[in-house]
Image (tube, rainbow, N blue to C red):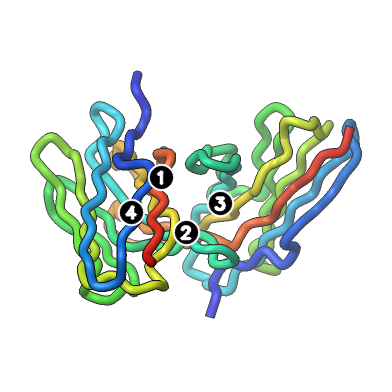
Amino acid sequence: DQQVKQNSPSLSVQEGRISILNCDYTNSMFDYFLWYKKYPAEGPTFLISISSIKDKNEDGRFTVFLNKSAKHLSLHIVPSQPGDSAVYFCAAREASDNYGQNFVFGPGTRLSVLP
Amino acid sequence: KAGVTQTPRYLIKTRGQQVTLSCSPISGHRSVSWYQQTPGQGLQFLFEYFSETQRNKGNFPGRFSGRQFSNSRSEMNVSTLELGDSALYLCASSLSRGRRETQYFGPGTRLLVL
């Protein structure tokens, strides 16, 4: 059973508009969330993260929102640019006593930004 | 600073063979994690090594193993390859000094099992 879900396999938006990518999780022990972007033939690149003690984190054109009660987070990209076209992965980590780097990833959403 | 490097980038093997993949983390990073990516499955966590010790392990059979050397370089081994092992294998490194850390990924090794 997938603990991190990205229910939209793909998303198309017009250049300059807002892109909203969604992610849902089932494990209430997750306390740290990240978004990664992946181009073909490259490894995932870190975009932005959020801790469960916050509900919003912003970095330039990228904003992540966390709704803990709904176990939902979203990534907003404003304005969207053609170079943002990639697969976006949501990832989460469970709170624990150790510093283990065990992240659970969603299946990804392919974003296409149309010029 | 050089990024995470993985070798080889592409590999073709046949069923029953074994394979070893290599990962060199970012200088100073002590944690190395391995992931398997298959179409529609996202990234599945294999294991994590820290200071030459396996610290976390995902839900994969014992055919998948790894190790880490004193210079933090890591290798992953898959024995008795199966067709379903065809995937992109990604390595990620981090400093692992705190809990709010980021993993940095290499470009991956694409393995095809025939």
Distance from disc 3 to disc 4, alpha carbons, whole Å, reads 28 Å
Residue B77: percent from left, percent from top: 21, 59
Q: Nearer the viewer, mark 3 or mark 2?
A: 2
First in residue order: circle 4 vs circle 1:
4
Q: Secondary structure at mark 2?
A: strand
Q: Nearer the viewer, mark 3 or mark 4?
A: 4
Q: Is residue A80 left or right of residue B84?
A: right
Residue at point 47%, 59% (across, down): B37
Callout 3: chain:
A
Q: Is B45 placed above or below B101 here?
A: below
Residue A38: percent from left, percent from top: 58, 43
**Which residue, as the protein is rendered here, is positioned at the far top?**
B1
Residue B21: percent from left, percent from top: 26, 49
Q: Is residue A13 left or right of residue A74?
A: right
Residue tagged by mark 4? B34
Task: Kindly check if marks 1 and 2 are in contact, taking CB atoms under 8 A apart as contact.
Answer: yes
Using the image as rendered, state which of residue A44 and residue B30 is in the foreground.
A44
- Have a look at marks 3 and 4 and say if they share a chain: no
Q: Secondary structure at mark 1?
A: loop
Residue at point 51%, 58% (across, down): A92
Residue tagged by mark 2? B37
First in residue order: circle 1 vs circle 2:
2
Specify the quadrant that holds the C terminus of chain A: top right
Amino acid on which disc 3 is placed:
Ile
- Have a look at marks 4 and 1 and say if they share a chain: yes
Distance from disc 2 to disc 4, alpha carbons, whole Å, reads 10 Å
Distance from disc 1 to disc 2, alpha carbons, whole Å, reads 9 Å
Using the image as rendered, state which of residue A63 and residue B69 is in the foreground.
B69
The local crowd at label 1, few if under 14, some if 14 to 19, many if 20 or more residues have their Cα within 10 Å, is many
